[in-house]
Amino acid sequence: MATSNVKQAMGDLNKESFVSLLAKIIGESKFLQNNPPELIPQEDKVVNHLLDCLKPYSTATGGGPLVINHVTYFPGRGNLIVEYPGTEPGKILSFVGMHMDVVTANPNDWDFDPFSLSIEGDKLRGRGTTDCLGHVALVTELMKRLAETKPMLKSTVVAVFIANEENSAITGVGVDALVKAGLLDKLKGGPLFWIDTADKQPCIGTGGMIPWKLHVTGKLFHSGLAHKAINALELGMEALKEIQLRFYKDFPPHPKEQVYGFATPSTMKPTQWSYPGGGINQIPGECTISGDVRLTPFYDVNDVMKKLQEYVDDINENIGKLDIRGPVSKYILHDENIRGSLTLTFDEAMSGVACDLDSRGFHVLCKATKEAVGHVKPYSITGSLPLIRELKDEGFDVQTAGYGLMATYHAKNEYCLLSDMCEGYHVFTSIIAELED
């Protein structure tokens, strides 16, 4: 089918249908918050709305042509794979990564109800509008339009709506399980567009993430007898400073970061600090500093974790050489044979990705973006997306894009723009059309 005919048949986004579906999905967002163990999302609440929209076009329950597969590995937490079959075996393209869970939202911090869709001019407001329920609704409308208009395509078009993207504490639920089961294997035959970024431009690079915890052990004592204490807070501050200095020496800005347009180089920093509590007149004997490494994809996550552990081992061995804070500040009490110490642990890490800038998928995405948005300016960030590095390493042509707003990503008062979603729809139809040639 000619490129122009495909785009003509697909037309514009049906705004009324899109907003109606998005309102239903955002209405479930209170139950989609992902912060275990307190908050475990129920993604099937979204799947049910998608099935209501698409089932009339299913080969199983309607007149076709959509092949729909609701895949669940954990009760109430399903994934949905929707396929519009093409005529040429092995010719395929896919839209993946539209996730049905959201980050938490405290209604007391928002200027409007985060758990219901509200509309202010072009703004569509609510938790998940940008990340990523807006994309869930958008790609659902795309597959629905394919089913309604039935263009004769050479390419099979597949949409994969996933569970459990926002938190890795629980695994085996979402896209990791789909890959393990081989359900995405056939997507290797063509470009895979991961739809979970923002600002309408191709995102060509993402960061790896290494969550870390540094537990600091000193000796608790009365603050009026500071010479008998090992101040865990001071030890933590000085040790972390030394770790950071070594990190930035070993993992400096990489030359390829400029090629990909990364906004920042790799970073290693604290984001949380906790201690067991105590009086103002007690020098704390322990504390825990937590944070993350955000790593550009030109460095290896495992190399960094190994180096961080080496830093900590060396500091422990030479704890008395760390800078102190005042005449009685110390990290070894020789008369009591007590040494301060550091223990480093990691939560599950993920690798970043540098998309292939020579691939068909990248060139098609750029051309479609220029047509729909008016300009194309690829960018990279050290935000992290799960599994796409693994997909790329396994041979998938992974490209990423999104049509929400980076400024409201994970933020309070989250919103997206309807006009941006309309442009995103045109990017999708242009991609489908272009890959027919």
Image: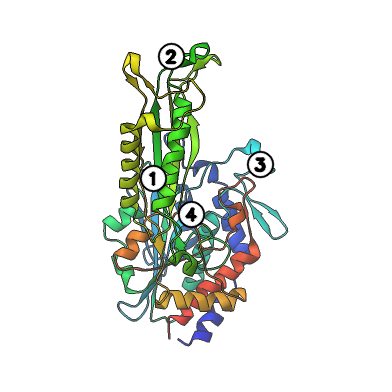
Q: Amino acid at mark 3?
A: Trp
In contact (CB < 8 Å): disc 4 and disc 1: no
In depth, the one of 424 and 258 nearer the eye is 258
Separation of marks 1 and 2 at Cα, in angstroms: 42 Å
Which label was assigned to residue 309? none
The answer to which quarter of the image holds residue 207 is bottom left
* Cα–Cα gap, marks 4 and 1: 15 Å
Question: Which numbered marker is on residue 110?
Answer: 3
| Label 3: element kind | loop
Distance in Å between CA atoms under marks 3 and 2? 47 Å
- Residue plotted at (44% across, 44% down): 244
Q: Label 1, on which residue?
A: 168
Q: Which residue is mark 4?
A: 383
Q: Which residue appears at 59% of the width and 65% of the height?
A: 421
Mark 1, mark 2: which one is toward the viewer? Answer: 2
First in residue order: circle 2 vs circle 4: 2
Picture coordinates of residue 414 (x, y %)?
62, 50
Q: Are marks 4 and 3 in contact (CB under 8 Å)?
A: no
Q: Earlier in the sequence, mark 3 or mark 1?
A: 3
Q: Residues within 10 Å of mark 4 (few under 14, many from 20)?
A: some
Based on the displayed image, in which of its 4 quarters is residue 186 positioned? bottom left
Outermost residue toward the left in this view: 181
Q: Which three-letter amino acid code belongs to the residue tagged 4?
A: Gly
